[in-house]
Image: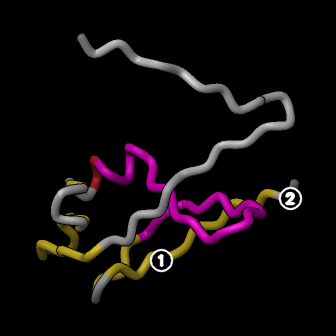
Amino acid sequence: MKRVIKEVLLAIADVKVPITLLIINALEPNLLLDTDWMRRYDMKLSFRKKNLTFKAKGQKIVTDLEFNQLWFTSPNHALEEYKVNMT
């Protein structure tokens, strides 16, 4: 798998912020933000509101998010079913 690391400006809403990207081949486009970036921009992720809030250049930025179901696959992993006793 080819991997490329680039220093780029990430545009979120009307703000561009510097970020280090690790670009990999994937079936679907995804953006994963590391915890250093989240701390630097005081990022808050709200699953209930479906938005991302962060501070950059003296502004509070709020942008809507789209959530997709995550699928983790491996040739060494078979699907298994588990039952949970809630009583």
Quarter of the image with the N terminus in it: bottom right
- Image quarter for residue 3? bottom right
Other-residue count near label 1 (Cα within 10 Å), few / some / many at <14 / 14–19 / ≥20? few
| Residue 7 image offset from top left, x and y in percent | 58, 67
Q: Is residue 29 magenta?
A: yes
* Residue found at x 23% / y 67%: 51
Question: Is 79 in front, or is 72?
Answer: 79
Ranked by sequence position, the earlier of labels 1 and 2 is: 2
Residue 13 x, y percent position in the rendering: 29, 85
Residue 39 — which label? none
From which residue to which does the magenta span run?
A: 18-38
- Determine whether label 1 and label 2 are within 8 Å by CB: no
- 36 versus 58 height, above or below: above
The amino acid type of the residue labelled 1 equals Leu
**Which quarter of the figure is the C terminus placed in?**
top left
Tell me what residue is drawn at x 20 percent, y 54 percent.
Answer: 44
The answer to whether residue 85 is above or below residue 5 is above
Q: Label 1: which residue? A: 9
Q: 80 above or below 35?
A: above
Real-space Cα separation, disc 1 to disc 2, in angstroms = 22 Å
Residue 66: x percent and y percent? 38, 71
Question: Element under label 1?
Answer: strand
> Which disc number belongs to residue 2?
2
Looking at the image, the residue that sits furthest to the bottom is: 14
Side of 35 where 79 appears, left or right: right
Q: Amino acid at mark 2?
A: Lys
Residue at 12 percent across and 72 percent down: it is 60
Considering the numbered disc 2 on the image, is that residue within a helix, a strand or a loop?
Answer: loop
- Pick whichever, 87 or 65, lies toward us: 87
| Left or right of residue 60: residue 31 | right
Residue name at image x 69 percent, y 63 percent? 23
